[in-house]
Amino acid sequence: MSDALRVVLVGSTGLVGRSIMQQCIGRADVRLTGISRREIRLPQGARMEMFVADPDKWGEVIEAVRPTALICALGSTWQNSGQDEAAFRAVDQHLVVNTARAARDAGVPRLVAISSAGADPLAKNFYLKVKGEVESELTRLRFKRCDILRPGLLRGKRVDDPRGKERLAQLAAPLTDLFLRGKMRGYRSVQADLVAAAALGLAGRKAGGRFTHDNDGILRAAREWDKLASD
């Protein structure tokens, strides 16, 4: 395991986070550690450490684990925040940025963060505006390598998180995706499993720099991860 990619995951209860844990099962080349605010049930067969701690202690856990990469899949929704701007920013902005800063201060060289298609600090939409602001803040932290993924609608089965409108959107996605062409391709829906695969693949890249990946970039990175799994 000395040559294994050491990854710390925050945001393990969401679609992407759960898929990351699932995809690491049986992978001797990845050593996954999760950090959460509450206890969660690990996927069957998962061999990983899961630390439960208050967010202000996450930096201490990261420093102790000394990972090669931090994957941040933290995120809520406007509805789950009670449509309260401060509550939404507390998770999607402050917790994300503070965790990334703690990882940088602990010497973690790589960051992979899940953002959103359309993220823009100048956006009129509050959700996309916050996502854009977060991207700017993460970039300024100056990790050796920073990858930001901008998926469109995430497809997959959520656990204990019913989202009626999102379920309807997922059902309609195969049809609506056909109309998203050209500059709108980045808004196409994508399976959460593919975003998870892309995040893991990018976490293993050594070349430095700051990169943003739209729908097509996510699919390319996911294929590379799948190829490694089959080798």
Image: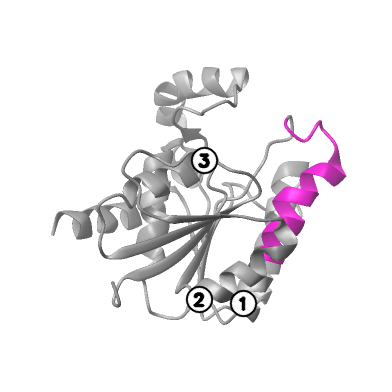
Q: Is residue 85 magenta?
A: yes
The residue tagged 2 is: 66
Q: Position of residue 212 (x, y in %)?
A: 51, 62
Which numbered disc, 1 or 3, marks the residue that appears first in the sequence? 1
| Magenta highlight on residue 108 | no
Q: Find the magenta span and give its range.
A: 80-100
Q: Give the image location of residue 154, x and y in percent.
A: 49, 36
The vertical placement of 144 against 165, above or below, is below
Residue that numbered label 1 is attached to = 104
> Which tag is nearer the camera, tag 2 or tag 1?
2
Q: Which residue is mark 3?
A: 152
Spot occupied by residue 173 in the image (x, y as percentages of width and height): 45, 25
Q: Which residue is rendered at x = 52% and y = 28% of the image?
A: 159
- Whichever of labels 2 and 1 marks the residue nearer the N terminus, that label is 2
Q: Residue at x 30, y 49 (%)?
A: 25
Q: CA distance from mark 2 to mark 1?
A: 11 Å
The CA distance from mark 2 to mark 3 is: 32 Å
Category of crowding for the residue at label 1, using alpha-carbon neighbours closer than 10 angstroms: few (below 14), some (14–19), many (at least 20): many
- Is residue 215 left or right of 86 when viewed as pictured? left
